[in-house]
Image (cartoon, helix red, strand yellow):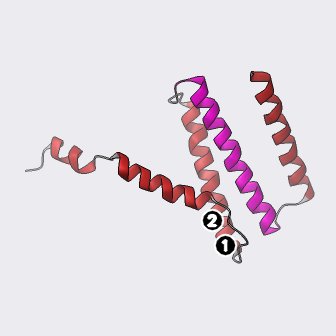
Amino acid sequence: MTTLQGVRELNQIDNEELHEITKIMFDSFIINGEYKSQSYVSKKEQLIDSFSTFIQQYLKLNFSGSKEKKLRLMKFVAKLNMQRELLELASGETNLKDIEKAGQRLGKKSQSAFESK
């Protein structure tokens, strides 16, 4: 007979397992050269976008605690978005208007970073 305690123990996520998954995710965000397949670049962009959205939702739910942790998460989202934009540039899909919008977003982010200090 399966007990609730037994199910919890089988489904327990430990620190080592989470660290391993984090390493896999980290490797997937790294931009390491030229990509020959547009499909691969697109999938990588989607992954980065999804993870960025996940962190933004996490911030909205206010689980992160201190202002320092929130700021750290916001900076990480900005880095993820920059990685995605670099992939777009590398794939040649970005046009001049997209680059201009990205520049404006980065300008606003840098202004808000200075305002908060």
The answer to whether residue 89 is left or right of residue 12 is right
Amino acid type at image mark 1 = Ser
Q: Residues within 10 Å of mark 1 (few under 14, many from 20)?
A: few
Residue depicted at 79% across the width and 28% down the height: 112
The answer to whether residue 82 is left or right of residue 9 is right
Above-or-below relation of 110 to 42: above
Residue 111: image x %, image y %?
83, 30
The mark found on residue 105 in the picture is none
Q: Is residue 69 magenta?
A: yes
The answer to whether residue 28 is left or right of residue 86 is left
Q: Which residue is mark 2?
A: 43
Name the element at disc 2.
helix
Q: Answer yes or no: do the residues labelled 2 and 1 have beta carbons within 8 Å?
A: yes
Q: Which residues are magenta?
A: 65-92
Q: Residue furthest bottom?
A: 36
Above-or-below relation of 52 to 31: above
Residue 45: image x %, image y %?
67, 60
Amino acid type at image mark 2 = Lys
Name the element at disc 1.
helix
Quadrant holding the C terminus: top right
Residue 3: image x %, image y %?
13, 44
Q: Which residue is mark 1?
A: 39
